[in-house]
Image (spheres, rainbow, N blue to C red):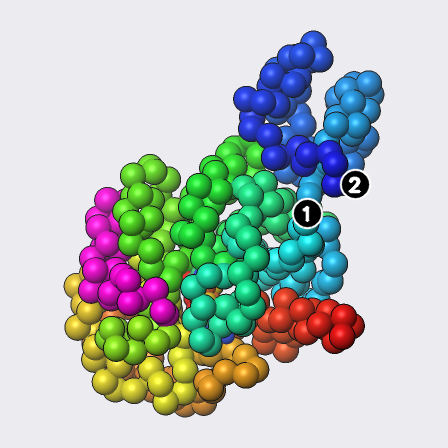
Amino acid sequence: MTDRPAILSISSKELDAWLASRAAPAYRRKQLWGWIARGAASFDEMRDIPKPLRSELDREFRLTSLTPVAVSQADRGLTTKTLYELDGGHSVEAVVMRYADRSTLCISSQAGCPIGCPFCATGKFPFGRNLKANEIVEQALDAARMLPAEGRRLSHVVFMGMGEPMANYQAVIESVRRISDRELLGISPRRIVISTSGLIPRIEQLGHEELAVTLAISLHAARDELRDVLVPINRRYPVADLVASAQAYADKTSRRVSYEWVLLAGVNDTERDAKELGRLLRGKLAHVNLIPFNPVEDTPYRAPERAAVRRFRELVEAQGLNVTVRDTRGREADAACGQLHERVMKERAVKAS
Ligand code: SAH
Ligand code: SF4
């Protein structure tokens, strides 16, 4: 049923008022949120909340607005990708990645993406819509529900799924506040990464939020001429200005900025690129994360050979920069964020024709 609002679509103040109007004590919110954070599947199982109140909650609200429509596993069960249908029919996905010391969730902030980077599966479909804050938080709640049965706990959240988080700023900030709220998921903002293609005014605004989330900049090229093509928003916000605004964020928060670099064979993996990157970032509180391209159909790009990745890494290191190569989790089954969605969209298109 889509007529009832999702419980997290109302603010904590609205929930408090709703509880008060039912003569329920204020601590019921804490109990309710505790159950939600522990992954309750229904209001009815919230045993320390009186039965009449549980029934009333169930009549008025849904626990989540997300409907899982496809789940795929990869890396021998270490990666789980879930595609969710949103109210109104758009869909987004989230990916759980299990490591020895942490469990990270990659979440979506928009259905589709308006930026249109030519190597990205998400950018290939028409933009759908912005997600609401609760739709973002509910992805994290679903992972928080999945992990305890495995003796794990959701520890990190990265906004690296579908969409440009800075183009849905208010909802993303509100979702970060809720994900980090100790009464809800309690994940420290330091363990939350907002990845952006580079909307400078929003990076500046983020610096004023007193949130101290980790900022990741999708750089991919250090010269405007190439970045204009790979990340089209660069035509509005050129690379030198972008790095200056990220550095201002680093200075303000003392948080090291992470620079993402998708390695595209023969396009941005040459010695020239490494030198330009060195000139741009040397001496800054920065970390470079190389991501070997995850092939996307109908794009002109190719993944680099292993040896080329190693070589580029060494070239960047030689520039005096801090660099790691990201392990591209989920490569076997639908790979990077955006690609399960691509397959499902194609299947739908085939069915519809
Ligand atoms: N829109 C934001 C966040 C989502 S994309 C951004 O661009 O930063 C998250 C990361 O995945 C970005 O660094 C993006 O460049 C990268 N990415 C997109 N498509 C990819 C692909 N096919 N292979 C590897 N990385 C990809
Ligand atoms: Fe959007 Fe990020 Fe994909 Fe570019 S890489 S199209 S900004 S999701």
**Residue found at x 45% / y 57%:** 164
Image quadrant where one finds the C terminus: bottom right
Q: Nearer the viewer, residue 129 or 209?
A: 129
| Magenta range | 231-256
Decide if residue 120 is in sight here.
yes
**Residue found at x 61% / y 58%:** 92
182 vs 262, left or right, is right
Is 340 included in the stretch rendered in magenta?
no
Residue 339 lies, in percent from the top left, at 60, 71
Q: Residue beneath label 1, please?
A: 87
The quarter of the picture showing ligand 2: bottom left
275 over 193 or under it: above or below: below
Of callouts 1 and 2, which one flags the residue occurring earlier in the amino acid sequence? 2
User: In the figure, residue 104 lies in which quadrant?
Assistant: bottom right
Residue 61 lies, in percent from the top left, at 72, 31
Q: Residue beneath label 2, please?
A: 1
The residue lying furthest to the front in this view is: 353
195 over 34 or under it: above or below: below
Q: Which mark is residue 164?
A: none
Name the chief secondary structure element in magenta.
Answer: helix
At mark 1, the secondary structure is loop
The amino acid type, in three-letter code, at marker 1 is Asp
User: In the figure, residue 296 lies in which quadrant?
Assistant: bottom right
Image quadrant where one finds the N terminus: top right
Residue 180 lies, in percent from the top left, at 49, 39
Is 250 included in the stretch rendered in magenta?
yes
Q: Nearer the viewer, residue 236 or 37?
A: 236
The amino acid type, in three-letter code, at marker 2 is Met
